[in-house]
Image (cartoon, coloured by chain):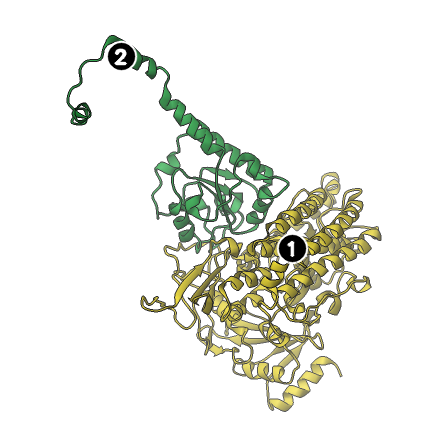
Chain colours: A green, B yellow
Amino acid sequence: MSTMGNEMNGEEKAPATKEEQALIEASRSYALTTRLDKLVAWGRKNSLWPMPYGTACCGIELMSVMGPKYDLARFGAEVVRFSPRQADLLIVAGTITEKMAPIILRIYQQMLEPKYVLSMGACASSGGFYRAYHVLQGVDKVIPVDVYVPGCPPTPEAVLDGIMVIQKMIEEGHPRPWKENWVPGEFR
Amino acid sequence: MNFLEDLKKDLNEKFPQNTFQYSTPFGCHLLEVPKDQVVEVLSHLKQTRRFDFLMHITAVDYPKRDKRFDVVYELFSSKSYQRLRIKTKVGEDESLPSAIPVWRSANWFEREVWDMFGIVFEGHPNLRRFLVHHEFKGFPLRKDYDANKQQHCHSALPIHFEDEFNYVPKPDSDLVPLNIGPSHPATHGTLRIMAELDGEKVRRANVELGYLHRCFEKMAETHPYNQVIPYTDRLNYCSAPMNNVGYCKTVEKLLGVEIPPRAQAMRIILCELSRIIDHIVCIGANAVDLGALTGFFHLFTYREKVYSLFEKLCGARLTVSLTRVGGMAQDAPEGWFKDVLKFCDEMSVGVDELDRLLTGNKIWRQRTQGVGAISVEEAIMWGYTGPCLRATGLGLDLRKVAPYYGYEALDFDIPVGTSGDVFDRYLVRVEEMRQSIKIIRQVAENIPGGDYTIRDKRIVLPEKKDVYGNIEGLMNHFMLIVKGLQPPEGEIYDVTEAANGELGFYLVSDGTGTPYRLKVRPPCFAIYQSFSDQITGGLVADVIAILGSMNLIAGELDR
């Protein structure tokens, strides 16, 4: 009891013996921290919980991605959550209009870290062929996007590929400056 | 006595010394009246039971004209199957009386016209922003509004009701405000419902539209006729080819051309395949919302099969854009029709499986029977068309009453319901899938030979071998690409029976290569308008069942 209290008070301990020092050195060489990171990343990448934000045609194609033929469950992303608080991958599938922009911003902010965004299709990525007065010219104007999947709508294979890219990013701990430099509520 | 003379005689008796003008451009009856008499004329036509449907109200902008706007009313009779377009001229700072006392469904139609053109309807209770967001300034469908001028929206609209826009929930009240959507699993899309609950009962409700307003009509005004086709795909994306067909049929009618029998047959097959996959999504999603997940995943297997057929035909799965003005973009590959017939065999098994899975299911029946019931009169008053109308007992199907592409020669039935509730809508859809299979079989077994498109140099691009092979083909191709096809000056309203109901296109041409104005009449817009009324007084759980049965597709609802 008394020794514990001393340690907590930050009092100096007795110098370690040679055997103790050798043990500390040896334990450092196992590099436990990086391995734990990898372990967590491995777990994360294989259990992505997507939130399908299907607004338009791409939403229908996203149903195919989830459906029996293409079956996103094979990639561990089986648990589709419609609550942003339970999801870590936001799939923006479809056109985001100006009216929708404040809402998708709020949805994104409600998601817990770590979180990823996949922009599915031309409209979500750039406004697509709707160069029009009420269409947001890309969802990356309001939230940071990790992977863009082109197509109008993209084939399910392309969406699966996009998800595999996100998995790779998670695995490798890819730096994400677009997310770090993002300012909420600002139109880019 | 023909229709217009009869109408003229009748109106002359009712309105002596009038200045009405009658004409029949491109086969559509048109009546032009002064703006002060519009509502009286509408009221008279409804009271004398000449017309019972108000299909849509829209406007056209002519900025150089003295009286800038044309306001257009489209009427339809479910008894004589006649149509009448009523047009009136309105100046920029003038207003005209609202038609809501005559047709309640005019509410949303007029609100949309105000939203897009800034035309004020006197007596309208709710002229607020509708499709565009609440911070939007200006009227986007006016010709002087730039198509590419975006305005950012910085806030979400709080809960509001038609009779109380600045709604504040009272802390000591038992009433609970509930907001569903625009991001909610049961709204599959971008619908937003706001309700005030008294326990489990809905006291009042309101809906907000426009979260997917993609400016289809403005885009159509800035693109050549053939380039509008991909935009039409994205109206009702659950059955994309049907929109292609509806649009091309309208332009072809304005051009006065008839497409070859093979193209007609291909279009019928595409339409009926689309009808099947549309109903699959509707029934599947409706069942998912009520807790029956199996049907959805099982039916999606069949939807994938249709995707494979489309893919084989043109390379695209969902948005095929396969029709062109004048026919099809290309012929079907060898053996395709055999594949279609094979699919019909598989699908008829699939429909029976679905039938066994749901129709007798006790939970499904209890959740749907008697829910959202609506009478024929009410349905007509709101402008219901398609399966939702037929579920009430009125067997109105444009494939029968105004046949096109040889539907008149095919053997099929129009299923009708009795009570118009969610269960009847489901039954009608299931039976329609069977009838569609029957139609496809008849057409695919007797597919006509010949060309898949007309070969008019002013309308259809030459084949690639001619473009690369001879100078005439190259010049023809160049001219058509640069100038586009140019229909004659005029206006037309043409309809097809889409999976959801009457899909109409109102097209105004000024003789150039782009449409002057293209208004689409989406079937679910009119149906959705009745939604707040239908759910008020019911249970909150039924809201989801009714919403699913209406098959609301945000793409065509908000355009």
Q: Position of residue B49 (x, y in %)?
A: 65, 82
Q: Quadrant of residue B557?
A: bottom right
Q: Position of residue A173 (x, y in %)?
A: 41, 29
Q: Are marks 1 and 2 on the same chain?
A: no
Q: Which residue is mark 1?
A: B278
Q: Is residue B61 visible?
A: no
Neighbour tally class for label 1: few under 14, some 14-19, many 20 plus, Cα within 10 Å: many
Q: Secondary structure at mark 2?
A: helix
Residue farthest top in this picture: A18
The residue sitting at 40% across, 64% down in the picture is B177
Q: Is residue B65 left or right of residue B471?
A: left
The residue sitting at 56% across, 45% down in the picture is A62
Q: Position of residue B221 (x, y in %)?
A: 56, 58
Q: Is residue B437 left or right of residue A32?
A: right
Which of A87/B128 is in front?
Answer: A87
Q: In the drawing, what numbered circle is on residue B22? A: none
Q: Which residue is mark 2?
A: A20
